[in-house]
Image: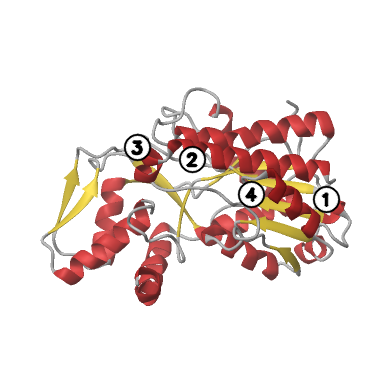
Amino acid sequence: MSNNKPSTLNLQPETYWQDKRIIVTGGGGFLGSFVVEKLKERGAADIFIPRKKDYDLTQREAVERLYADALKNVDPKNVVVIHLAANVGGIGANREHPAEFFYDNMIMGVELMHHAYKNGVGKFVATGTVCAYPKFTPVPFKEDDLWNGYPEETNAPYGLAKKMMLVQAQTYRQQYGFNAIYLLPVNLYGPRDNFNLQTSHVIPALIRKAIEATERGDAELPAWGDGSPTREFLYVEDAADGIVVAAEKYNGDLPVNLGSGYEISIKDLTEMVARLTDFQGKIVWQTDKPNGQPRRGLDVSRAKELFGWSAQVSFEDGMQKTIEWFKENRSKITG
């Protein structure tokens, strides 16, 4: 594949978005809600958010109907699709639903991008996942290492399904000249995250468990694994900003990491959550539970180089904002 550099024409955000219609799949979700806010901040006024109840994106008929509805009265060249919708969960959910995670995510990406191309859509922004990286990728993960091995087993069906959008984006660019870009956000966290203990990722699960354990006066806080794996996390508002900036400024075929560049062990993360939630007991490691990928941290230099983006929110600040949001909204989200 050619290493297409982005256009050097850096339009002002207000100018870029003012004549665009933006389709944001997953626009009502955790990341999507922040992407929609960022778009509005940058001058976008015409945003189409397909709801799951109206469009099942795993069905071709629904995808065709989505484009028929969303492209009315607009030049398709002025349409940008930002595909964020996904069937996703933590390690437990990945182990229980590997086939669903593979099929749903694969088919959504394939159909949405294919029909965007067929309808003459101007740009498609595909969001992949850090789970696409091989299990033993050297840290920090460089985009060039994406194909150098098999992903961590529990995340592989999801990660590989999402990685197929990179192949699709590059081949559709090569054969059809279709402008599809592929972004790789690291694990996200922040306000409005999923705090359901059955399906949540590590940060919201830890925050909820620690707050509830503190309130009960528990002596122990159970945590999955042995605490040794490392992870990188990106505050959701930073991720939304990165996606919107890439949509404005990047028009190349190279995959691009979106991360914070800050790697932390699960042990240190758990101790931070305990400190920030005033949990006074002992952390007990459940070593019969899986650790997941041993290390995870991204090389974030390509995003800076190709479209001038880097994360702005420090990890501790982001964690404090997330904890405060959960405390304020807990009754609404936990019942």
Mark 2 and mark 1: Cα distance apart in space: 41 Å
Indicate left or right for 51 with 171 as reference.
left
Task: Classify mark 1: residues with Cα within 10 Å, few (<14), some (14-19) or many (20+).
Answer: few
Mark 4: amino acid? Leu
Mark 3 and mark 2: Cα distance apart in space: 19 Å
Residue behind mark 3: 292
- Quick one: label 1 or label 4, which is nearer the N terminus? 1
Foreground mark, 4 or 3, reads 4
- Quick one: label 1 or label 3, which is nearer the N terminus? 1
Mark 3: amino acid? Gly
Residue 81 in the image, given as x and y percentages of width and height: 72, 52
Residue 218 in the image, given as x and y percentages of width and height: 13, 64
Mark 4 and mark 3: Cα distance apart in space: 29 Å
Residue behind mark 1: 9
Q: Nearer the viewer, residue 129 or 314?
A: 129
Label ID, residue 100: 2
For the point 88% across and 62% down, the residue is 73
| CB under 8 Å between discs 2 and 1 | no
Mark 1 and mark 4: Cα distance apart in space: 34 Å
Task: Classify mark 3: residues with Cα within 10 Å, few (<14), some (14-19) or many (20+).
Answer: some
Foreground mark, 2 or 1, reads 2
- Quick one: label 4 or label 3, which is nearer the N terminus? 4
Q: Nearer the viewer, residue 9 or 42?
A: 42
* Mark 2 secondary-structure assignment: helix
For the point 67% across and 62% down, the residue is 49
